[in-house]
Image (tube, rainbow, N blue to C red):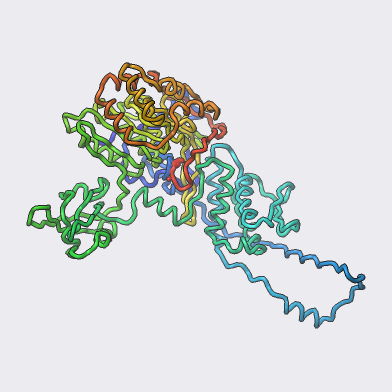
Amino acid sequence: MRGLPVVILAVLLCQPAPVRAQDRAGNQTLPPPPLTPRQSATASPAAATQAPAQAQAQAQAEQPVVAQAQTATPAPTQATPAPASPTAVENAPPAPPPQPAAHDAPAQPEQAAPASSAATAQSAAPETPPPPAIDMTLIHSVIATALQFLAPRTLEPHSSRDFTLWGLGSVTALDPSLAFDARGADIRLLLGQTPILSRVAPPADDSEQWAQLATDFLDSARQHSSAVASASREELLQAFFDELFNHLDPYSRYIGPSSATTDRQARVGGEADAGLTLTQSGPHIVIASINANGPAWAAPLDTGERLIAVNKRPTAGQSAETVREWLRGAPDSLLSLRLQAPGKRTIRTVTLRRAKVPPETVFAFASGSIVVLRITSFSADTAEELSQYLDQAVQDKHLRGLIIDLRGNRGGVLQQAMTAAALLLDRGVAAITSGRDPQANHIWAVEGGDMTNGLPIAVLVDGRSASAAEILAAALADHRRAVVIGSATLGKGLVQTVAQLPDEGELFVTWSRVIAPLQWPLQGLGVMPQICTSLGALETGRAMRDLAAGQLDNQPAVAASRAARYPVPVSRIMAIRRACPAALGTDTDLSVARDVLEHDAWYKTALAAIPDEAAPLAPAPTNAAPAIPDVLPASLPAAALPAAPSQPAQSAP
C-alpha cells in the first residue's frame, strides 16, 4: 500500500502556544504525512520567519469543522498555568430589609428594647443556611486558563475585562435580582440597588487579576442568592462560559468534563479493544465488520466468521454485547480469539493486541464499475482509512469512477481533510486559514501524487455537510478534480482550536477563517455544487438533459460563488445560495453521480464550470484584527464540530 502523500503547511509567524491547547483534532493517532513548513514568498522577512509547523495540544477537547485547526507533527509546547490560590473574598453584609410603615395609628416615639428582649429576638430569627461548598480554587484556575487562552486567539481582539464581564452576566441570568455596575473605576455587585461587593477594576489585559475578580464575585453571589448557591461547580462554569460566548461567534463554546471526555473518545478512541463489530446469528456470535483503524484489520480473520471463544471463555449462550465487553481491556494487552469460518469444522486461534480504536468513519461499497466511499466525519484516522480503501479500489481494472459521499458529514479534524485531499490531488493549495494569532495562519499545500491517477470523482454534499467536509469538497472542486453534486452546504468556514482546562472540560475557540483554493471564503457561502439536486425532480431532470446537451444550468451560481471575496454581505450570500438551496440528500444524488461518471462528456462539462485560475500561494495574512463575518442562521449545534466545526469545528463536533 502506498504511503500517505505529503501535506506542506506554510506557517506564518508561528510561536509556541502559551497554554495546553490543540487544534480541533485531538491526538494525532494517524501518522500524518510530513508537513513541511514553507514561508510565503511575499511575507516580509522581518515579520514572517519560517518555522516548523507545530500541532496544537489536543484537548480540543473535534467537531467540527469543525474543524479544529491542527498544524503539524512536532509535539506542542504545553504550559497550563498552575491553579492560583484565590485571595480572601470580602463580602459586605446585606442591607436589612425595610420595615413596613404603620398607616392605621399615629407614629409613636422609638423606645429602646431591653437587652434581654433583643437577644431573645435575635436568637429566634431563622438563620440563612450557608451555600454548599464548591471548589472555588478550581473555578479560579479554569477561568484564568480560559482568559489566557482566549486573549490572543479570538477573531476580533477583546480584553480579559471584556471576557470576564460578559461571563459574569451569568449571575444575573441565574438571579435577576443581582446585577453589575462597571461604569466607574470600580466593579460593583448589586443586590437590587444595594452594593454587596466592590473591587477596583484591574488592568484590562491582566488575565490573572480578572480571573480572581470573577471568582470573588461568583463566590459573593453564592453567599447572597439561593439561586446561584444551588448551582453546582459545573453549572456555574457552564453558565459563565455560555454568557461569555454569547458575545462571540456561534461555534466558540465550553464543554464540561463529561461531554468533553465523550468527545475526545469519539476522536481518538476510548477503551482499547480489537476493532471488531459483532452480531448475533442464531446461537452464534459472528463478526459483522472489521474497523480499518483497529488491530484486527491486519489479522487473518474475516467478516462472517463465528467467534467461538475469547481468551478461552466460550461465547456459547452469551449475548453480542457481553462478548464485546470481553474484547475490551488494557491497551497492548493480548487477546486470543477462537474462530470458525462458515461451512467449515476447523477451529483456529488468532492472537492480537488490543489498541484504542477511533470510530470507523469511512465505509465503502461497489456499485457496478463505481466505488462509493462514504465519509461520516473526520476523526484521527480518517485519511488512513480512506487511503486503504482507495488502495483496494484502484486494483479493479474495470473501475470507472469514485463517488465520495459527504452528505451529513459535520466535519471534524481539519488536518484529516487536508490529508484526504492530498490523496486525490497531485499538488497545489488545498486551503488557506487566516486569523489573528500567527499560529492560525496556514497555507495547506499538498503534494505526493493522486492515488487514483486521475480517476473521475463525484462528491455528494447536502445542507448538513459542514466544516472539514466542505473544505475537502471545495479543494477537489476548485482544482477541477471532482464534480460536486447535491445542494449548497452549511457554510461553516471557521476553524476552532481547543484548550483542555484544569477541570477536564474543553474550550473551543474560533481562531481562523477558511479561504478556498480559488480565494473565496467558505463562511456563509458554503460549497455551491456544479449539479444541483435540491430544486425538485423536474428541475433535476431538466438539468441533466441540458448537461447532456453540453450546458450546465448551475454555472452562473458556481461562478458567482468563486468570484466572491471576503467579506461577503449577507444579502449577496443569500442571493448566491438561492440558486441551489440547502436540503437533505436523497437517492437522486447517487443516481445523478452515476450518470455523470458514466458519461465522459457530461463529466467534462461539469468540471468546466470551475474557473481555471489556480490560486497562487497567498501573501502572509495580516495580523490586524479582522471582523467576524456574517453567519447564516443554519449554524451547527454547540455539541457538533465547526465547525462549526466544528460545527467545528470541528469541531470541530
Q: Quadrant of the N terminus?
A: top left
Q: Residue at x 62, y 53 (%)?
A: 173
Furthest residue to the bottom?
A: 116
Furthest residue to the front?
A: 538
Q: Quadrant of residue 554?
A: top left
Closest to the observer: 634 or 145?
A: 634
Residue 443 appears in the figure: no
Closest to the observer: 229 or 331?
A: 229
Where does residue 420 sit, x and y in percent of width and height? 32, 35
Q: Is residue 636 above or below residue 42?
A: below
Q: Is residue 245 left or right of residue 273?
A: right
Q: Is residue 615 left or right of residue 423?
A: right
Where does residue 383 sit, x and y in percent of width and height? 31, 39
Q: Quadrant of residue 31?
A: top left
Q: Residue at x 77, y 66 (%)?
A: 96
Residue 373 appears in the figure: yes
Closest to the observer: 243 or 354?
A: 243
Closest to the observer: 45 or 228?
A: 228
Where does residue 366 sit, x and y in percent of width and height? 22, 36
Q: Quadrant of the C terminus?
A: top left
Looking at the rendered structure, the number of numbered marks drawn on it comes to 0
Furthest residue to the top?
A: 550
Q: Residue at x 67, y 63 (%)?
A: 224
Q: Is residue 146 above or below residue 595?
A: below
